[in-house]
Amino acid sequence: MTVKVSVVIAVYNPGKYFEDCVTGLLRQSLTPDEFEVWFVDDGSTDETPARLDALAAEHPHFHVVHQESSGWSGRPRNTGIDAARGEYVMFADHDDWLGDEALERMYAYGRANDADVVVGKMAGIGRPVPQELFRVNRPRVTVETAPLIDSLTPHKMFRRAFLAEHGMRFKEGRRRLEDHVFVVEAYLRAKSVAVLSDYLCYYHITRDDGSNAGFQRFDPVGYFKNLREALDVVEDLTEPGPVRDQLFSRWLRNEMVERLRGQRLLKLPEDYAEELYGEIRAVITERFGPGVFDRVAPTQRVVAGLIAADRYADVRALAEWEAGIRPTGRLTSLTWENGSLALGFSAEYEVDGAPMTYRREGGHDLLGLPLSEEAREALAAQDISLAAPVDRSDVDLVVRHREQATQYYLPLTSERHRTGIGADGDGYGDGHGDSAFRQEITARAVLDPETAAAGGPLPAGLWDLHLRIKSCGWSKETRLGAVRSDGVEATRLPALTGEPRRLVLPYWTDGPGNLSLDIDQRTGKLEREAGELMDWAEAGADNGTLRLPLPLHLGSAAGAPLQLRFERKNVGKYPAEATTDGRTLTAALPLERLTGKRWAVRIGIPSPERGEVRWTRLPVDVVVDAQGRARVIDRHTPPAKPATRAPARPPRPLWRRVAGRMRRALAGGRR
């Protein structure tokens, strides 16, 4: 059979992280005769060579090449390209891993769309990955029609014939950004690129010890020398104009301006920061014109202009102010509607604990940045204004798997609101007159557990809600739920959704109290939540019928039978079938079995992944007396003491007690 995909992995002393990489390869849904793996050992000095040889001996589709250390990833990747036999070549790092169906899905998607390059959705575990690129599937795109330039790591599929046609290879030796040079050339030469966003293909991780090569502090001179090589590729393959400026803006934004903002600059040693600034300024003044500046966000344009004008002190002062910026969110509503969780919230930026403000002057909205008069003049000389496009501010709400970092955007609608700020900080007016004003965004998002994962159900596990605010070049993320309105708690119910039914439990995390979801009972929180959310004073029993508050939202399953069970240790477990009107559970008590005892009450919740019903104890017990009368009590109520006691025996007369002591004394003497 023709090999569909060749996976090429450069390996050098990976340590414990290598096992996740290998496990991901062994779980691939492609059969072993449909793909191959080329491990290229670049002179490892630990036990890795022996481990690779053992893998190759055990798995015929795993192959190993041992070579002398080259110092970086370029040469071993080229060795893998030369050895590959697959229709497509996929590059992976030895400390990352692939989704179980990644190779199969990416290959099929590439074939279906005749793509030279296939970009699979990535998740960053402890490190950032592109967000906007993976909002939707993009079957046939170019750098002009999609934000491909946001993703320049090599962890993609490339048609092998395409690489051969253009003689494409990685630059070799100990260097930086060799992946940028390779990937941007591939984007510009490809007739079509396919972006697969509905399946998580690649897990990009941060090592616990921070030893990822890309996280090490670099030599600014060498780094920006290598960056210029990527710019050279763009100049060779594009004409001057909007496309080139748009591509160049990616490096201006990510590799230059963002390194000199906020804590990222302030955490650097002063001498290193100044050297970095000098090299960045050299590239900006050599290679970038106004057209590049115009394609970055307003705040990034300001920083770029200050760099071009050689205003390092102002760059640093602005970084100190930006270090105090925090995104904030308030959860205002949380309700189940037709099987979906509807979330209302508001969001805005704060600076040092106070709302961020903008200026309104002459009918224009302006950034309220703390710039010196000299800095403002330097920016004006470059036609860089402080215009604030607050009418384009927006928010996203994503649901993210806590362990795997898989995330999905939730559909939402939003509105922007501005409020004028008086001299004493009080709000007044609508913010449209000349004044300082703050901006707040209100939104309503919908989370359908059965469609939120790109049209499919969210997998079982713990999912966290993350709010991202985008405004004027700031894009920052925070958790949602720790700040919330008073009425939210009353409507925060667990729910049974989907078919087969499974539990979705919204809960507050320990400590901060952020909003998370437990899907299919990965925690034991349901028992506690049922006790806190429902008014169990409404529970009761009469005429052999039990009535309990319903501790669940049933959605379309309202009216369906639910399972209850009455339990007593060392006695037995007796089931009952309950019906509900959507608010109350009603069940017939098996009185003949319960009479004379106190019983714990459990509700049966289906767990599709485990293929079983999990029983959760409710915060009430049922007591049935000897006459068969039932009542409901709090489960923490101690057992009742007996109603009557046997009469106490009267004390013995004194003469009997004295006679007893004498007999015992005489008996002791005879011994």
Image: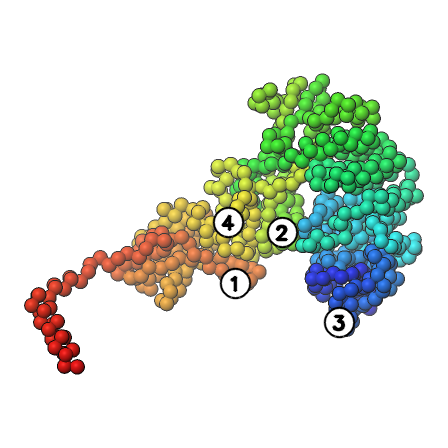
Q: N-terminal of the two: label 2 or label 3?
A: 3
Of the residues shown, which amino acid type is indicated by label 3?
Ala
Tag 2 secondary structure: strand
Q: N-terminal of the two: label 3 or label 4?
A: 3
Rounded to the nearest angstrom, the CA distance separating label 3 from label 1 is 40 Å
Q: N-terminal of the two: label 4 or label 2?
A: 2
Residue 219, compared with residue 611, is above or below; it is above
Residue 337, compared with residue 649, is above or below; it is above
Q: Residues within 10 Å of mark 4 (few under 14, many from 20)?
A: many
Of the residues shown, which amino acid type is indicated by label 1?
Glu
Q: Which numbered mark, 2 or 3, is in the foreground of this view?
A: 3
Rounded to the nearest angstrom, the CA distance separating label 1 from label 2 is 23 Å
Answer yes or no: is residue 229 visible.
Answer: yes
Q: Which numbered mark, 1 or 2, is in the foreground of this view?
A: 2
Displayed quadrant of residue 262? top right
Of the residues shown, which amino acid type is indicated by label 4?
Pro
Q: Nearer the viewer, residue 95 or 162?
A: 95
Q: Are marks 4 and 1 in contact (CB under 8 Å)?
A: no
Residue holding disc 4? 494
Q: Nearer the viewer, residue 75 or 663?
A: 663
- Classify residue 268 as left or right of residue 488: right
> Which quadrant does the N terminus fall into?
bottom right
Residue holding disc 1? 612
Residue holding disc 3? 54
Residue holding disc 2? 401
Rounded to the nearest angstrom, the CA distance separating label 3 from label 4 is 49 Å
Q: Nearer the viewer, residue 350 or 455?
A: 350
Number of numbered discs visible in the structure rendering: 4
